[in-house]
Amino acid sequence: MTAMEANATEGVIDAHHHVWDLSVRDQNWITGRELAPLRRDFTLADLDPEARAAGVTATVLVQTIDVPQETPEFLALAADSALVAGVVGWTDLTSPDVARALAVLREGPGGEYLVGIRHQVQGESDPRWLVRPDVLRGLAAVAEAGLVYDLVVKPHQLAAAHEAARLLPGLTFVLDHAGKPPIASGELRPWADSVRRLASLHNTVCKLSGMVTEADWGHWSVEGLRPYADTVLDAFGPRRLMFGSDWPVCRLAATYAEVACAARELTAALRPDERREVFAATALRTYGLTVTGSPAAHEKPCVQLSSSPGPTT
């Protein structure tokens, strides 16, 4: 571990969270009664006390909707934040001018915080969207810019993710939310087989994030999550696995503290150095974050988690 990695691991890095302001832009995916708790503004000011209480000293802010205006706004937020160390933004990968679009983002306010790109592939009807020639050309431009690519895909899209990662060995692919396994149904395959195949490529990394909302929101348990966490731990190893809260989406099933405590329980069997990888060093390396060695915040003790009390707002 380098000196920089050692400094960063004095606190936890939350490698995946969101913010939004509905007065600036609607989040048109928040529809129906089940998602109603999310239909409000969630800001960095809301996140900060919850994250710091969990020992988090740096975060990665991730795009939510595929519009060009959001990323410059997030970069400006990062530049003015003591918490956000990196931004995973969006650009149109099918455009013939992806390289220029990325350069414009880098040249704007907070451009140095741009660490990756993501597209809502989970919403694409074509299961092979990631390996379309125009998308592969865009992904190659992301690699050339020295950025990583976050994969938000459903299990049936993992085959195309594997193919794209194989075709572009110079690009690091980060699998968000462990590939959205079917935790609520209790099924492991074919998700587990597809994840292991993706993990066989060394330019892939995985986030231990988003699992509580793939489970039964009102009755999830750490033991119910464990087979899926164990699968990605075994497939990727601690040096290619990173913690993410998926706040505020996680609030549909659990508080920030509950998500952080669940992640700690799921990784409790790891050695201390391996836990440092999952909770900080992997994110630092993967995203090339610049994080000063700020001391860890006071960490609230984890209670024994058996199940969630239900959706929270």
Image (cartoon, helix red, strand yellow):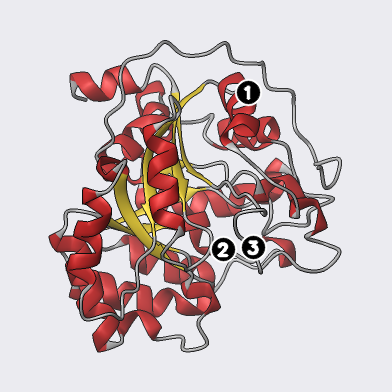
**N-terminal of the two: label 3 or label 2?**
3
- Mark 3 belongs to which amino acid? Gln
In the rendered view, tell whether residue 302 sits above or below residue 181: above
Q: Is residue 258 left or right of residue 54?
A: right
Where does label 1 land, which residue? 49
Q: Is residue 284 left or right of residue 40?
A: left
- CB of mark 1 within 8 Å of CB of mark 2? no
Which of label 3 and label 1 is nearer to you? Answer: 3
In the rendered view, tell whether residue 80 sits above or below residue 272: below
Q: Estimate how packed mark 1 is, as few (under 14), some (14 to 19) or many (20 or more) residues with alpha carbons within 10 Å.
A: few
Rendered image: mark on residue 27: 3
Q: Secondary structure at mark 1?
A: helix
Q: CA distance from mark 3 to mark 2?
A: 21 Å
Q: Could you tell me which residue is drawn at 52 percent across and 87 percent down? A: 125
- Name the residue nearer the viewer: 104 or 252: 104
Q: Secondary structure at mark 2?
A: loop
- CB of mark 3 within 8 Å of CB of mark 2? no
Q: CA distance from mark 1 to mark 2?
A: 28 Å
For residue 306, which quarter of the picture? top right
- Mark 2 belongs to which amino acid? Lys
Q: Could you tell me which residue is drawn at 68 percent across and 22 percent down? A: 302
**N-terminal of the two: label 3 or label 1?**
3
For residue 271, which quarter of the picture? top left
Q: Secondary structure at mark 3?
A: loop
Is the N terminus in the top left, top right, bottom left or bottom right quadrant? top left
Where does label 2 land, which residue? 180
Q: Estimate how packed mark 2 is, as few (under 14), some (14 to 19) or many (20 or more) residues with alpha carbons within 10 Å.
A: many
Which of label 3 and label 2 is nearer to you? Answer: 3
In the rendered view, tell whether residue 194 sits above or below residue 54: below
